[in-house]
Amino acid sequence: MSVESMAKAYEPAAVEAKWYPLWEQRGYFKGDPDSDKTPYTIVIPPPNVTGVLTLGHVLNNTLQDILIRFEKMRGREICWVPGTDHAGIATQAKVEKFLQETEGLSRYDLGREDFLTRVWEWKEQYGGKIIQQLRTLGTACDWERERFTLDEGLSNAVQDVFVTLYEKGLIYRGHRIINWCPKSRTALSDEEVIHKEKKGKLWHFRYPLTDGSGHVTVATTRPETMLGDTAVAVHPDDERYTGMKGKTILLPIVNREIPIIFDDYVDKEFGTGAVKVTPAHDPNDYDMGMRHELPMITVMGDDGAMNADAGADFQGMDRFVCRKAVVAKMDELGLLEKIEDHQHQVGYSERGDVPVEPRLSEQWFVKVKPLAEPALDAVESGKITFHPARWVKTYRHWMENIRDWCISRQLWWGHRIPAYYCAGCGETVVAKSMPAACPKCHTHEFHQDEDVLDTWFSSWLWPFSVFDWPTETKELDKFYPTDSLVTGPDIIFFWVARMIMAGIEFMGDIPFKDVYFTSIIRDEQGRKLSKSLNNSPDPLEVIATYGADALRFTMIYISPTGQDLRYSNEKCEIGRNFANKLYNAARFRAYHGDRTDQWDDLSDLGRSDLRPDDRWILARLNTAVQGATTALTGFHFHEMCHSLYEFVWNEFCDWYLESAKAVLNGDDDRARGTVLRVFDHTFSRILRLLHPVMPFITEELYHNLGFAGDEETVMRAAWPVPLAAEQAAAMGADEEIVSQVASKFDLIRNIRNVRSTYQIPPNQKIKVILVPADENAAAFLQEDPASLAALMTASEVTIATNYESSGSTGTAVGDLATAYLPLAGVVDIDAEKKRLRKQEAELLAFIEKAGKKLSNEKFVTNAPEKVIQLERDRLADLREKIARIRGRLESLA
RNA sequence: GCACGCAUAGUUCAGUCGGCUAGAACGCUGCCUUCACACGGCAGAGGUCACAGGUUCGAGUCCUGUUGCGUGCACCA
């Protein structure tokens, strides 16, 4: 590609639009079950079919894409299965709202069948938007395998599982108190209830004793439930109430006679020590009700309004309206003793965002304890690894205290429960299809259970249902168990734990080996992103402004390990600027001609063929390759981005590229060729290392610089491996060169500092005389004076054993040498002394510290020899350097 | 209440096994349209590693406690 056709700044839009369709068409993302390669599989956490791309998805899917592309380059047969979740409540609510707004119809107007037809229509038209949006991000998903949790195959798996668990006795139907969402009018699982800290009131009511001998004061946060009270409970040891044994209470307003019961559950210290008991509307009261065989009176309907059993005065009232009415009535009756402010936790429906109502009803449950035990063991034993590991504790706590999972939902959108009830005798038959005849009464008439299943009852099967389980497909054989799961810690119970249970139960094997929990994204003020705060940036806009690569890189670069991530759009400048840096390094390369022929393999090059700076960059590249590989295999994405960023920017561009100019702008063709080979070799590796994070620009530049053929891709290039130790040694790309060149850069920096002090224009070339600190330094500096001159912007670099400065001369004291800069008329003796004295003071502080350490006998006797020697060497170096500074100061005096 | 996490430069964060002068980005100061890049370069300023103890030759790092912030779980009506 010609330099002229390359714009000065990188423009990602066209590049990104060009590559994605090519990748997809050429089938680079396809997972082949017949391949001989070791598979590497990821199943996407299926986003809601109603969803649009959020930053959370960007982070999550970028991480998966990094793993997939990394493992593909490492030679694995990759398979990343995408798809969407039917998201029961969310989708049903969304379509209901849509129908209400567009046609003024409710789901009841349409009826179940027609409503479902409309939801499917809606799904076809508007659903799965996010699937298209993910392509914009560059994700290497195997789109031909896209699945939907409500498609035919997955529904089959769901039914199969339901029937199996029922037959094993792990699914049962029971009359229990469950969490009810009055807005969505459905049961919820415990996990779908969010506890919010709320300021409330504690009302103290007087409940008169039936015999007229006084009253008991009860405290409640929920006055409306008193209409369903069937007892008052006190602690058996509470002396205040010992005389109440056998007595009853005449429940005010309702005028129902209810017993006083004695139960350990009651806390004597709280409130008045007496609790009103409403078994149908409180889980604890329900337990007491069961223990004491109390009647259970439901006083509310499914919409949260009071029913007939609440009494004619309250029937039809909303629960919160009724609360006020009951308090007013009690006050009127003179039975309201006092009202206290009370801070407490109120359970809210995750989806409906209204307080949940504990409600007694007939629901289906999964008995999870037997499933949880092996699932806990899989994580504790290390068969499954969590990253970061601390989530294991959270997981363990939940698994050890797990309660049965309420799986029935009073919705229409979802997998219908495969239970059939005989019209004749009421017999329940659980089967994948409507039974032909009742096994008991031989009736042929059945009706299917009206309820559908919790959405998570299909997603927990996702890692194998996407491969058409229970059919024994070759995909299932090849790609299960999957390798890594990337997801948010917020769904560890909803999804991760349950997938582990299902995998072990139905496949007999764990569903994945590693689980990486992503950061939670917050805005700059640390608030969670939410629609209502209007602080959720639209990733598509960000991509349009900065590019997908920039967004991807930035997200990973700024996400701290295992903590929340603070995001703002401006931070995408990090990724954009970095992409631009890479692009311009490529542009620089293009100025200097076509790709070299032997760019990939440098094994013919020996130490003497290479300049110190070439050897240095090859050694640093080795470190970068090792670092990136270790970081990625350990799921340290953030670390990988930081180290590559620094390598590319601070080492490759700031130093190597500048040093290369010394040769490239010269006229030694052989030397030019070698430097270009080293450049091409290093830059091609940089592009490969960065490809998983920044797929578009790396592919573009890999082609532009001729590293890939027309039909090829950087995706199929091998992941870089460090040089073998012998080869690195033969090339002189070793520790010694790294340390020498670091010292050289220190010297150059010192010289630049002098230039800066005297405001020498950056392009003005000056004479530099170097007096090396010792013979090694002298030999090293002699090796490549050209790069020294280039990096110092020197007209002439003289290496001398000593130098008698005369007149106006600046001095730079570095590790390798003292540099003299004859600068006629600009050097200020006082400024010069000041600068040197500052350097002297700094060194002195370190010398004292090191001296103290070494004169400490305990240090010398206890510390490892290596550490002591290091300290001695350091002290010697510091002393040598400070002597040079002092010498110079004397000569200035 | 229980559990987990966090506290390092103005800000957001790195800092591996305890060991060389604690790093980066953004921001800040000065110089520079220089030949890949002003989405840039060069030079620089900026730190009581929350606090108090302890272990150690040596602590940002390990231990104990304190304070502050955050998250998860939990039936206190």
Image (cartoon, coloured by chain):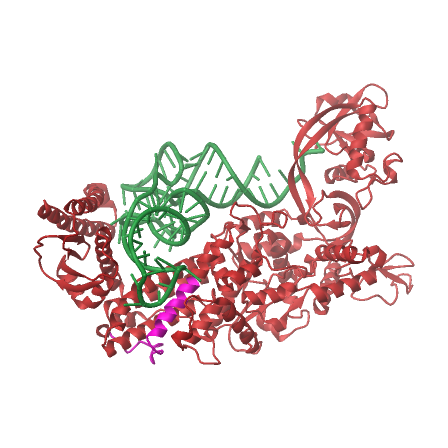
* Residue A782 magenta-highlighted: no
In this rendering, position of residue A662 left or right of residue A634: left
**What is the x, y in percent for residue A74?**
46, 71
Residue A202, picture quadrant? top right
Mark yes or no: residue A482 visible: no
Of A666 and A420, nearer the camera is A666
Taking the view exactly as shown, the residue that stands out farthest to the top is A213
The tint chain A carries is red
In this rendering, position of residue A181 left or right of residue A580: right
Of A183 and A511, nearer the camera is A183
* Residue A583 magenta-highlighted: yes
Chain letter of the green region:
B
Q: What residue is shown at x 72% (from left), y 42% (from top)?
A: A355
**What is the x, y in percent for residue A877?**
18, 52
Q: What residue is shown at x 63% (from left), y 50% (from top)?
A: A531
Mark yes or no: residue A683 visible: yes
Residue A242, picture quadrant? top right
Of A641 and A186, nearer the camera is A641
Quick one: quadrant of the N terminus of chain A? bottom left
Region rendered in magenta: A578-606
Residue A122 to residue A874: above or below: below
**What is the x, y in percent for residue B24?**
37, 54
Of A423 and A527, nearer the camera is A527
Residue A42 to residue B45: above or below: below
